Image (cartoon, grey):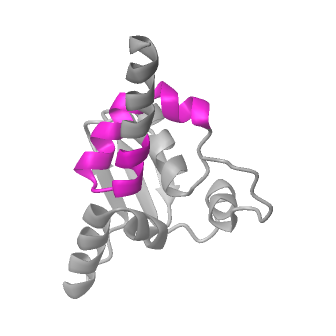
């Protein structure tokens, strides 16, 4: 989430400008895809890190990741989160789907953020 950051997020800028992206994420049944950086994805997701490390051991570099069970919009929100460039409104809009993705891709900080938002919402309803 954006928080009064003084230094621009260079990784988010590189993603936006498609600078040296090295992996394509194919989403759902659509023809849509998202280009990203293997190093950012692997650094933020334990599942993706293992996938990339295992492929390197086999001397393979995956250029495409298929995510069949996620909508394009949710995947974009997930990538925005991984690049530390998500707006709070977008996080809240896809909160349940992002929580599922956080669990599936072992993204602990996203899981915690989603759970805190949901817990605060429940607490406000009970007051």
Q: Is residue 80 above or below residue 23?
A: above
Image coords of residue 6 (percent x, y): 80, 61
Q: Pick the residue in front: 57 or 116.
A: 116
Q: Residue furthest right?
A: 6
Residue 127 percent location from the top left of the image? 44, 13
Q: Does 22 sit left or right of 104 as displayed? A: right
Question: Is 78 one of the magenta-colored residues?
Answer: no
Q: Quadrant of residue 90?
A: top right
Out of 124 and 27, give the one closest to the viewer.
124
- Specify whether 84 is left or right of 99: right
Q: Residue at x 27, y 56 (%)?
A: 106
Q: Relative to residue 58, is residue 79 depicted above or below? A: above
Q: Residue at x 41, y 49 (%)?
A: 110
Question: Which residue sits at x=61%, y=50%?
Answer: 85
Give percent across and percent down for residue 88: 59, 36
Q: Main secondary structure of the magenta part?
A: helix
Q: Residue at 51% x, 49% y: name it.
A: 81
Residue extent of the magenta highlight:
88-113
Q: Position of residue 58 (x, y in %)?
A: 19, 84
- Badge count: 0
Write down the quadrant of residue 55 in the picture.
Answer: bottom left
Q: Is residue 102 magenta?
A: yes
């Amino acid at each position: 989430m954006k928080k009064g950051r003084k230094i621009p997020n260079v990784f988010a800028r590189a993603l936006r400008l498609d600078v040296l992206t090295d992996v394509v994420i194919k989403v759902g049944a659509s023809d849509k895809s998202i280009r990203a950086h293997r190093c950012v994805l692997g650094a933020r997701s334990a599942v993706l890190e293992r996938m990339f490390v295992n492929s390197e051991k086999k001397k393979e570099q995956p250029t495409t990741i298929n995510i069949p069970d996620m909508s394009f919009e949710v995947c974009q929100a997930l990538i925005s989160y991984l690049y530390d460039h998500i707006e709070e409104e977008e996080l809240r809009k896809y909160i349940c789907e992002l929580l599922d993705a956080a669990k599936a891709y072992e993204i602990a900080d996203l899981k915690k953020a989603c759970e805190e938002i949901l817990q605060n919402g429940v607490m406000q309803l009970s007051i």
